[in-house]
Amino acid sequence: MNLREQGIAKLKEFSENHLSNYAKSRNFDYGPSKRDNVSNLSKYITHRIIDEQEVIQTAHSKFAYIKIEKFIQEVFWRTYWKGWLEMRPRVWTTYIEDLKQLEKQKDSVEYQQAISGKTSIECFNDWANELIKYNYLHNHARMWFASIWIFTLKLPWQLGADFFLKHLLDGDAASNTLSWRWVAGLQTKGKNYLATKFNINTFSAKKYEVLKLNDQASPLFETTSFEIQPLHFDKVENENSLFLLHNLDSNFLQKFQNKYNHFALLDFNSILESKNYSKQVLDFKSSINEELIDQLKSNFNSDLVVKNKEDLLKIVKDKNIKNIITPYINCGYENDFMNEIKKKIKITYLARDYDQFCYPFATKGFFGFKEQIPKILSKIL
Ligand SMILES: Cc1cc2nc3c(=O)[nH]c(=O)nc-3n(C[C@H](O)[C@H](O)[C@H](O)COP(=O)(O)OP(=O)(O)OC[C@H]3O[C@@H](n4cnc5c(N)ncnc54)[C@H](O)[C@@H]3O)c2cc1C
């Protein structure tokens, strides 16, 4: 089975056997050996091996909306975060600047203990080890971990978000950065998420007798305010075009067979390697890339790979390319890399209708976005 077949099989199995129970059971973290109360689809969705629209369509084909509302809302959380960050790219660039300032703190004993699961807090150590071993954490464990990181261990939230992004197979700049900000009390201003012993022991399979947490901490605050910038979606021109397929929207070509003249794989792994992404995450992304290159070979007889600006300039020159087109790349390291290339070469981002339709609803909080879900569903179902 290739990755897409695996993702579709997982979606089918989850929809048929576990989806109806999702709302009741999703908050329990039963540990890595029992994860069937949640879908485990995130690593597929993050790379759009299967996309949000088909996940929602499959779920909806099995049950009435009212029975699976919670699941559909969770899928839309991802879309909401992405739209929100696209309109405030400075949240991402500020986070990157903060990380540069905090680089030295990575040498501190406290940080090193936290990322190697050697603190005095047993549950935290368990999750740190689980993340490193499985490259996944249950949503509730992510919330507890982030809360303890920020409020009990008093480490900067940015370093925690960085640790997650580089170890999660589903690592996504929007969902990750904004969820960490949400736990810290920066996203919903003045409202932080505080993990408690009671909540952890109610929802976690393992029970922790000795657990002292700072469950009275105040939210973090920031002086910067991030103004909304209008969304921009490029217009596509196809004349002597080069299409760059990448693993942030892996199923794009299969779904949208347009007419392009040349095809190549855009491989981000060396960029992510330079940012110290974990080996397992890089290996997973490589395995997606291998499947994409097979598709390009069999469908378009191309084995071209772009890893840097020089590779791209060479193809443009050799093939006299007039237009370079790639599936939309959201805020994140991959987009930062593309922005550098865009200083030299014009590149068109091709956005899916789903994103173009949904992102403008992410102007404020999720509550406002949620009210638009019926409208979105009537368009995509
Ligand atoms: C601190 C923190 C960091 C996070 N970082 C990421 C990240 O880098 N990438 C990521 O995809 N999710 C992230 N999440 C959200 C969430 O934890 C995961 O999407 C979810 O646990 C994935 O497991 P699942 O596929 O079984 O989810 P399910 O519960 O089965 O949900 C189905 C799908 O909906 C989406 N989804 C569910 N919950 C959320 C949510 N709270 N926010 C956004 N999308 C959601 C995911 O695409 C998921 O695959 C983070 C949450 C927290 C609290």
Image (cartoon, grey):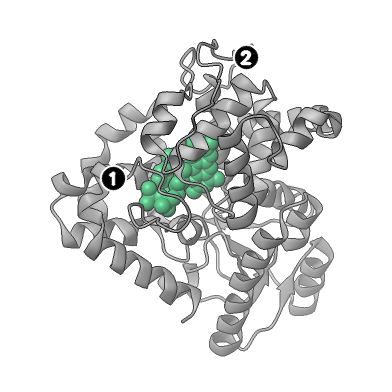
Residue 131, compared with residue 94, is above or below; it is below
Query: Mark 1 belongs to which amino acid?
Result: Ser
Do residues under tags 2 and 1 come within 8 Å of each other at their CB atoms? no
Residue type for callout 2: Glu
Crowdedness of circle 2 by 10 Å Cα count: few (<14), some, many (20+)? few
Query: How many other residues sit within 10 Å of disc 1, few (<14), some (14-19) or many (≥20)?
Result: some
SS category of the residue bearing label 1: helix
Q: Residue 103's x, y, as percent? A: 83, 33
Q: Residue at x 70, y 66 (%)?
A: 267
Q: Position of residue 333 (x, y in %)?
A: 69, 47
Q: Is residue 359 visible?
A: no
Q: Quadrant of ligand 1?
A: top left
Residue 165: x percent and y percent?
63, 45
Give the quarter of the image for residue 290.
bottom right
Q: Position of residue 255 (x, y in %)?
A: 41, 71
Q: How far apart are the alpha carbons under marks 2 and 1?
A: 35 Å
- In the image, 238 versus 232, the foreground residue is 232
Q: Quadrant of the C terminus?
A: bottom left
Front position among marks 2 and 1: 1
Q: Is residue 373 left or right of residue 355?
A: left
- State the mark number for residue 222: 2
- Does dot 2 land on a helix, a strand or a loop? loop
Nearest the viewer among 319 and 183 is 183
Left or right: 262 in relation to 375: right
Q: How many numbered circles are shown?
A: 2
Residue at the spot 22% in from the left edge and 50% down from the top edge? 21
Residue drawn at (25%, 43%), measured in percent from left and top? 23
Task: Name the mark on residue 25.
Answer: 1
Q: Residue at x 51, y 11 (%)?
A: 216
The reply to whether the residue tagged 1 has its Cβ within 8 angstroms of ligand 1 is no
